[in-house]
Image: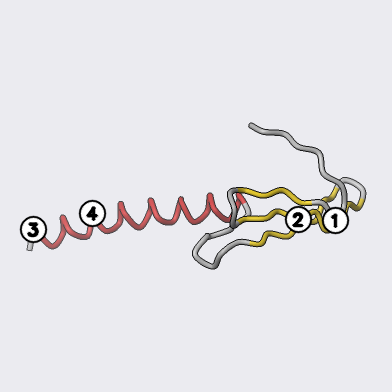
């Protein structure tokens, strides 16, 4: 893990197309802005984990559905 310190109005570049901007620091909360191409999906980690769980659930439901179709 790379750990960097940034102040308000400073930014971090990831590659040449993704910029992470520090918009505000309020107490223990940091507000960031992310500038990235529309083709790059950006999610909060808890949303990303929920999407992954739903995808896994859909895959297992699809395979069990296919098995039921084979039996008919």
Element on which disc 4 rests: helix
**Mark before the other along the chain sequence, 3 or 2:** 2
Question: What element does badge 2 sit on?
Answer: strand
Q: Is residue 57 above or below residue 4?
A: below
According to the picture, the residue beneath numbered tag 1 turns out to be: 9
Picture coordinates of residue 71, whole percent (x, y)? 8, 58
Per the model, the C-alpha gap separating discs 2 and 1 is: 7 Å
Residue 21: which numbered mark, if any?
2
Q: Nearer the viewer, mark 3 or mark 1?
A: 1
Q: Which mark is residue 71?
A: 3
- Residue 43: x and y, percent? 59, 57
In the rendered view, tell whether residue 52 sits above or below residue 41.
above
Which quadrant holds the N terminus? top right
Say which label, 4 or 1, has the lower sequence index.
Answer: 1
Residue annotated with mark 4: 63
Q: Are marks 3 and 2 in contact (CB under 8 Å)?
A: no
Which circle's residue, 2 or 1, is located before the other in the chain?
A: 1
């Amino acid at each position: 893990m790379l750990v960097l310190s940034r102040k308000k109005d400073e930014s971090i570049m990831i590659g040449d197309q993704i910029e992470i901007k520090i918009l505000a620091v309020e107490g223990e909360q940091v507000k960031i802005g992310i500038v990235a191409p529309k083709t790059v999906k950006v999610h909060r980690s808890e949303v990303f984990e929920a999407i992954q769980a739903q995808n896994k659930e859909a895959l297992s439901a699809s395979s069990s559905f296919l098995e039921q179709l084979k039996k008919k």
